[in-house]
Image: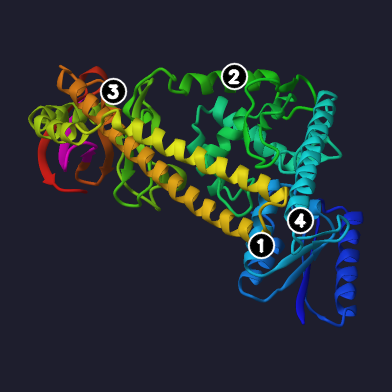
Amino acid sequence: MLRVAAYARVSTEKDDQINSLANQRAYFENYIKKCPDWIFAGVYYDEGVTGTQTAKRAGFNKMIEACRAGEIDLILTKEVSRFARNTVDTLAYTRELRACGVGVIFINDNIDTRDGDGEFRLSIMASVAQEESRKTSERVRWGQRRAMENGVVFGNNSIYGFTLKNGQLTVNDDEAEIVRLIFYKYVCEDKGSHIIARELGEAGIKPPKASGIWSGAEVLHILKNEKYVGDLLQKKYVTTDYLTHKKVTNNGGKIYIRGHHTPIVDREMWDKAREIRESRAVSANATHPYRSGVKIVCGCCGSSFTPRKSPRKSGGTYKLHMCRTRARQGKAVCGMRTVNDKSLKTVLEYISDFFTAEFDSAAEEVARETETLTDTDDAGAARISEKIDEVNGKRIKMLDGYFSGKITETDRERLTAEYDNELTCLKSQLDALKNERKIRTERQCGSDLLETIKNETRFSDCVYAEIIEKITVYADCLIVKPKYLDCSFSITYSARGYKDAYTTTIESCDIVRGEN
């Protein structure tokens, strides 16, 4: 008696597809129960998911786990394209199932993986299914682009302030008032995104994401979204691989339509908000330590610190750093102090003096670790690559012999297992060699950087970004952890003065050895 299961899949959640899925499930159940030598082991199914990826198919993965657990002997499925449209996945899973003693029958394609030529015929049909998936993907993308050029809006109904239905945007009056309020606070009241987010939360206004809270990032997203001025930008991202469905930023070919729909804010308000946003943004070419990789964290709640501009009573602004939790939720949640940007730079300059004393021992240690970095690594990698090519050549000859009848099915399976094991071993050796080379190269870069640091008469912001691993802010001190030294600095300081007369005095600096 064979324990037989079935697998069914539809790629959309439309009614006709769901009805098709229900019919398939009923058909397979009746089909299996009618066979006296079979025991019904269930129907596994997925709906509304793609066939090019198995990772997101819960029903499929549950069926595979049942096979691995020895609960299924045979699987029925309608056709290869329902099982998977990725050739690699199709062959990999059918081979794994065969190793577990589980066969797969593709009814419409008349393929049984238990037959001698089953895998050969399956590989052909799987390739055809994959190519059909590629063509379908291209047709869909072409159709979407034409529709976008004609003003049809794609996406789900999650654009705050608008309702999206049948590809058209209409203003949601209740949410639109909140959008106008955000722009007013930003432009007319000169408030930052974090302050606006906190005030919206305190006012009990529901955020775009019902389960979350208002955040500075959410406010900025609204301030940047061109839809609120009536414009439409689509094709911001593109799918580069129809198999993985990975999306990347579209650097060309975006579709922008000005005056596409009814705006929520007028263009004058939108332009002012954009000008303010650009003036507040740190230049991409600037090398402030907090924008160049130095991580500043709160010693109380663990949140990152964020740069802020705070207004002076007499006019103008000054830079400081504030805990994100405090910025978003107020002092009641986290009361950690802020750090003036000038004080932070004074602390970093003070620490730079210690690097001169610590440099020699650190540089010598790095140099010793990089002495063995030679061309022998490249030679070793070349030898392994040659062996991989040699094994692949053997596999091709073996398959030629199999299809010509010179090699039996038993010998083919034995040789395939041997070649697979040998390739796995060789690839592991190659990966290990490449990883070792990468580590040595990184250490060499560290040595080069330390040499640069040694020759600096006064550290610059870009150097700080490369040598400081983390700064932890506490109520009474700053703990600074360098990247290349086995120690940290515990620093206390005081500040006084105003504007150009503002000064910071280092009160104490304790060196703590070991990792922190």
* Amino acid type, callout 1: Asn
Numbered badge on residue 117 = 4
**Inter-mark Cα distance, 1 to 3:** 50 Å
Q: Are marks 4 and 3 in contact (CB under 8 Å)?
A: no
> Is residue 75 a member of the stretch shown in magenta?
no
Residue 301 picture location, percent across and down: 35, 52
Overall secondary structure of the magenta section? strand
Q: Is label 1 in contact with label 3 (beta carbons under 8 Å)?
A: no
Displayed quadrant of residue 106: bottom right
Question: As shown in the figure, which amino acid type bears the numbered disc 4?
Answer: Asp
Q: Tell me: residue 67, above or below residue 486.
A: below
Mark earlier in primary sequence (4, 2): 4
The answer to whether residue 59 is above or below residue 336 is below
Q: Tag 2: Cα neighbours inside 10 Å, few (<14), some, or many (≥20)?
A: some
Do labels 2 and 3 touch, CB within 8 Å? no
Image location (x, y in percent) of residue 149: 82, 23
Residue 9 shows in this picture: yes
Residue 17 spot, x, y in % from top left: 88, 55
Q: Which residue is mark 2?
A: 272
Question: Quick one: label 4 or label 1, which is nearer the N terminus?
Answer: 1
- The residue singled out by tag 3 in the image is 461
Q: Nearer the viewer, residue 515 or 65?
A: 65
Highlighted magenta segment, given as a residue range: 480-497
Q: Residue flagged by tag 2: what amino acid is it?
A: Lys
According to the picture, the residue beneath numbered tag 1 turns out to be: 61
| Of marks 4 and 1, the one in the foreground | 4
Look at the numbered disc 4 and give the secondary structure of its residue: loop
Does residue 495 show up magenta in the picture?
Answer: yes
